[in-house]
Image: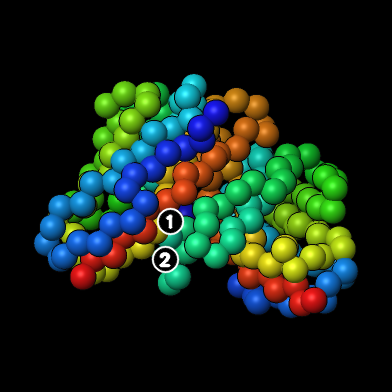
Amino acid sequence: DAGVIQSPRHEVTEMGQEVTLRCKPISGHDYLFWYRQTMMRGLELLIYFNNNVPIDDSGMPEDRFSAKMPNASFSTLKIQPSEPRDSAVYFCASSLRGGLQETQYFGPGTRLLVL
Amino acid sequence: QKEVEQNSGPLSVPEGAIASLNCTYSDRGSQSFFWYRQYSGKSPELIMSIYSNGDKEDGRFTAQLNKASQYVSLLIRDSQPSDSATYLCAPRDNFNKFYFGSGTKLNVKP
């Protein structure tokens, strides 16, 4: 299996611009998670989906952030307008809802720098 | 708010020694617990999972769980310089939501 795929791997943009991050989960996984990681705040869960439906978006920092999952193989995280404090590594992860040992698998991440 | 506490470190151990990483969690409903390793600039990768009280061994790694004390630990025997990384503890709740600690940075000195 190809694993979780994220694009772009690196993004540099200017404050005020729209940023769209993309994720393809592992085929057959029914949960998809978006995380943000910074040195100061560690790994934070932003939102997660089950069967393409958002379950918990309490971690989304503000209205500038939005996430969609139009089908089982694709999700986007959009920031509009972007701000320098959004600079971070954004990870997408997917998992199965199965037994106690089912874990989540992370993509390589998108490194976002907002100037 | 479900919380996960880890000592941020860095924890420094000599090569060949045992490294002990600890984690406490607040959600008594969590049934599964995961340890991830994260190298600098990389994504977290699964090391061990545990869901029963007691010890679980996998090669040089041993996970320990005590649900009554809400405590999870990871022991790394015969530590190698390649084990130098940040280790993240992550309980999973009944809604399949993972809660991550801030991680413990481990340095294994040759």
Where residue B20 appears, x then y in whole percent? 79, 65
Q: Amino acid at mark 1?
A: Glu
- Which residue is at 72% across, 63% downward? B82
* Quarter where residue A10 is shown: bottom left
- Residue A113 in view here: yes
Mark 2 or 1 closer to N-term?
A: 2
- Residue A86 in view here: no
Residue under label 2: A38
Name the quadrant of the N terminus of chain A. top right
- Which residue is at 73% across, 39% downward? B51
Where residue B43 appears, x then y in whole percent? 52, 53
* Quarter where residue A24 is shown: top left
Rendered position, A26 above or below A80: above
Q: Nearer the viewer, residue B21 or B45?
A: B45
Q: Does the residue at mark 2 contact the one at mark 1 (Cβ under 8 Å)?
A: yes
Secondary structure beneath dot 2 equals strand
Q: Nearer the viewer, residue A112 or B26?
A: A112
Rendered position, B63 above or below B84: above
Rendered position, A86 above or below B96: below
- Which residue is at 16% across, 65% downward? A14
Secondary structure beneath dot 1 equals strand
**Mark 1 falls within which chain?**
A
Where residue B1 appears, x then y in whole percent? 47, 55
Name the quadrant of the C terminus of chain A. bottom left
Q: Amino acid at mark 2?
A: Thr
Residue under label 1: A44
Rendered position, B51 above or below B36: above
**Mark 2 falls within which chain?**
A
Which dot marks residue B98?
none
The 10 Å Cα crowd at callout 1, few under 14, some 14 to 19, many 20 or more, is some
Q: Nearer the viewer, residue A85 or A45?
A: A85
